[in-house]
Image (cartoon, rainbow, N blue to C red):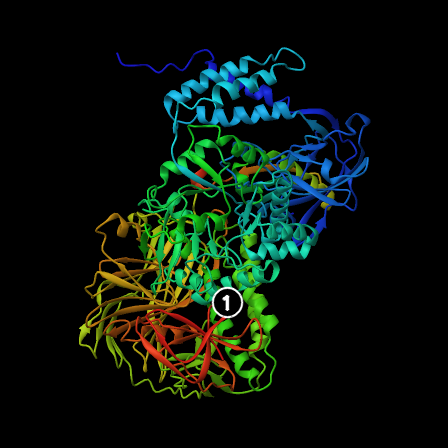
Amino acid sequence: MGHIKVTRRSMRPEEYTALRFGWLKRYVLENLYEIDSLSIRDARQINENEYEYYSDDYRQLKKGDMYFTPDGTSFIKGDVKIPAELWEKELWLYLKTAAEIVVKVNGKYVGGVDPNRDRILLSPYIDSETLHFEMQGYNRSKPDDERNPESLSVRGCRQVFEGAYLCTVNHAVLDLVYDFEVLLDIAGSELFNEDYRAFLNRELNNAMNCIDFDCEPITGIDEAKSYIENVIYSNTDYKGNGDVALVAHSHLDLAYYWRRIHTVQKNLRTVLLQLRLMDRYPEYKYTHTQAYTYETLEKYYPEVFDELKKRVSEGRFEPVGAMYVEPDCNIPSAESLIRQCLYGQNYFREKFGKTVNNCWLPDVFGNSWILPQILKKSRVDYFVSNKMSTWNDTNRFPHNNFIWRGIDGSEVGACVPPTHFITWNMPSQIQENWEAYQDKNIGGQTMSMFGYGDGGSGVTEEMLEMMKRFEKLSVMPKTEHVGGSEFLEKNLKDNDKLAKWDGELYLEMHRGTFTTKSVLKQYNRSLEFKLREAEIISVLRAATGIRYPKEVLTKCYKKLLINQFHDILPGSHINPVYKDAVKDYEWIDKKLDLILNVENTDKYFNSLNFKRTAVTFIEDEKGFNQRHGKKGFWTVPALPAMASGKLIDKTTTDSSWIKIGDKIETPYYIISFGDDGSILSLYDKELNREWVNGEFNKLKVYDDKPGVYDAWDILPNYKEKELGFELASPLKLLSKNSEVAELTVLVKIGESKWKRIIRLFKQSKGIEVENIVDWQEKHKLVKAQFDCNVLTREAVCDLSAGFIKRETHKNTSWQQARFEVCHHKWCDLAETGGGVALINEGKYGVGFGESSMSLSLLRATERPDPYSDLGFHNFCYLIMPHAGDCVSAEINKTAYEYNVPLVHSEVSCANTFDGLYLEAMKQSEKDETVIVRLSEQDGTRGVLKFPKPVKVMNMLEDVLYETDTLEYKPFEIITIGI
Amino acid sequence: MKDYIENVIKPKIEGDGGEVEFESYVNGELTLVFRGECSKCLILERCVKWIKAEIKRDKGENVKIYAIRKKPFFWDS
């Protein structure tokens, strides 16, 4: 008979130690004096620092009362006279709560309580015997720290008030509690030496035996402390190894399971609590990201901001992450990422006189290959992001400290810490970090971030007390508490042993975020280009004396950047966050319309620095055609680069260019359509070849049930269950004229109606598909499949500032993991003679197979937002077969034309910067210099000559040098001032 | 009642990642469907009591609430 695991047994010594540890903690607080004069007013936050109240006045708040409401903010106040027995003693407030409460006493911010901390030191901040408490709390029913069991146990919208007390702390007991806490963690972790753990279990039991719990008060505290010092801490027989840098940090999602308006207070509490720890622990230093959060603190809590500024000047409160927010780094364009750095760094420079040398994105869902260049040119030398090490579902990312080489060859020092960005600084977490660290011999120290996040408000006293004890523990890795920059400079700077990663930092997870909440992606794309348009036109108008609307444009840009936060644009948030984002987008759109629509002219301006040659839809109420619900006409604008001109609707009813029968013949193709709008054959008359080899422009509906990470993930096996659709109305001719012929088809997917309008053009090889959808599904993924008659092993994807080639085969686990990737305006499959490009106006997710592309169109996820993507959608994509490769076919230019609107304006610009793409033209942040951003996107070299010397700048608009001749290299982004 | 639940109560519940839908209101008996985070909330009954009190305060009606939890498939174990 085999071994039977014994499950029923008496208490083991280590369990008895743990039990007594619980008893010991009861003796930390002494002289508890209940504050029975509190009153509360329930409210709900409706805007930044704006509330609607449930009652006109406060009600009494007694122990046992219910408090907090769904999505509720509560205001608690009360006066208490310090009892005589507590005078002259170190006074604390004790309040155990599930909410995030910030506390003011006699008008001063003294600290906060939350599920991770339940007492606040009052003495240093009070100077009277009467205390006037003012508290503001936000009850998050969905705490972020699901890893913290105590936090999890108190979740829920309605809470029971457990009372508030003035008290003192028995520091001898507290000190011993921390000793036991650190040692019990080691004793319970299999990551440490087995013999040492046996030693610990034995000796902790002995230490606990020093305490007599039957006495009141308990005795033996000093003896237990001495025993631990003399027997456990002094033991050096067991040697650990490793070198771990401990960096204090609190991750803060601007919006997620809460709205952005709540983050103002979440951030206040986080900052305040770290400042209060700094008051007590002189060696403590803390890192904090996102210029936006500093801005809100400065705006609403200037007194706390002043304290922060002082600590920044001392080098203890460290702004990290050069960006304005922590954006998604897949979907935003190059120019958006540049602005993240520009506005972020400008703020840090202005307020603190600091240029931040690192990009700090612990939670971001993968990072584009264009980033190193943007960082380097924004005075950022280092990059930090945790996700690839802890979340990859297929491959272990092979480095933690390394060099990241970007698309243009720019390099930054990179750190992908081996463990999560939220830890609570326990020995087992530090040991785990060291063991997972892959660059032990070459990378120097490994980084371990500690501190709760998302309103959990960072580091606690407990974490710092743990840290004091690490050096007494020979079994632990060597540890050092350092700042963010300090770590990066010490370990990555001039470290020529570091390995190099040349390519994107693809996260093998969260692949659904390229597609979830389609409307946000579409808005983001269109507004990125509309901002481009508004800035360029405003600069050119300024040359004629019209004031450049810098303030409004900056506001618009900042709002766009905020909504690129990594839980907003990717779609991983609750429904109110979605509504806020749409409201913001509508606001930006209106503001930009006000800027753009001031000229009373019938001319259109081509803001592209090349001649427009692609057929384009021009909105016009008298037009024959309709697109995106608006009337207009199709034409080839033929407007020269950076010039304006009139566009005349020459559409007639003459449709002789197209022959419609069983097959459809246009000047470019002979096409056979399926009833559902899929293309069975696309024969290219110019190139004498067929483009279709299977399903082409075919809607594919898949069962999409990734599980808990619903909004985030698409599973690798998503194709296993195809659901199909019902043909409600087969393909038929909708209209035809001298420029375009439209065919339409209606399909039903479950309860949803999906109308497709397929457009064939007289003057373009492009075939446009407009999708008008009433989407009412759950857990379905819809893609458009394109099996191309093209033999290739690589797909080319636009990154907005260059392209990336991705393998289409599945030879290794690395290619297998990349079954869904992010692209920008276009992707392309081509062989030597030609290929097929897909150009979109806001679709970012795409999968590649052998000679196939599948463009992700819509998802229908349920968590965190049960209404995600439900409702109306209207989006287009363009199928563009071409000769040669995507560069020689100028697919990128076509994609620009497809996305950049033509707006009414009579401005023009003589300098067209031939050979490069004009990404932006704006007024300098510092003065009235015109900033021009150009990017090489085809992978070529060249020389740019200017009639007069220009200022060559970095992306922060600092002048580097002047020249009239500028050499550029592949994928380079250039900033010049004129 | 439907309008009240959808326009007054629902936005508040949504703010916490929860979801409430009006199902029916017959003879003082109000049936609500809870989704999202509410569907697995350990103390949902406290919230239901609060909704009842809010209805009493805002509409002056005493209602009996039946709460139906509809968990998404991944929590429905």
Residue A425 x/y as whole percent: 50, 36
Q: Residue at horizontal 62%, vertical 51%?
A: A264
Above-or-below relation of B75 to A903 = above
Tell me if mark 1 has few (under 14), some (14-19) or many (20+) residues whose alpha carbon lies within 10 angstroms of its own: many
Left or right for A873, reference A120: left
Above-or-below relation of A357 to A798 = above
As shown in the figure, which amino acid type bears the numbered disc 1?
Answer: Leu
Say how many tags the image has. Answer: 1
Q: Nearer the viewer, residue A77 or B39?
A: A77
What residue is shown with label 1? A956
Q: Nearer the viewer, residue A226 or B23?
A: A226
Q: Residue at horizontal 73%, vertical 46%?
A: A54
Q: Residue at horizontal 39%, vertical 87%?
A: A652
Above-or-below relation of A244 to A597 = above
Residue A100 x/y as whole percent: 63, 41
Q: Nearer the viewer, residue A621 or A495?
A: A495
Q: Quadrant of residue A276?
A: top right
Where, quadrant-wise, is the N terminus of chain A in this rendering? top left
**Residue A750 visible, this angle:** no
Residue A938 x/y as whole percent: 32, 72
Residue A952 x/y as whole percent: 45, 74
**Residue A951 visible, this angle:** yes
Judged from the image, the secondary structure of the residue bearing numbered disc 1 is loop
Chain under disc 1: A
Q: Quadrant of residue A935?
A: bottom left
Q: Quadrant of residue A300?
A: bottom right
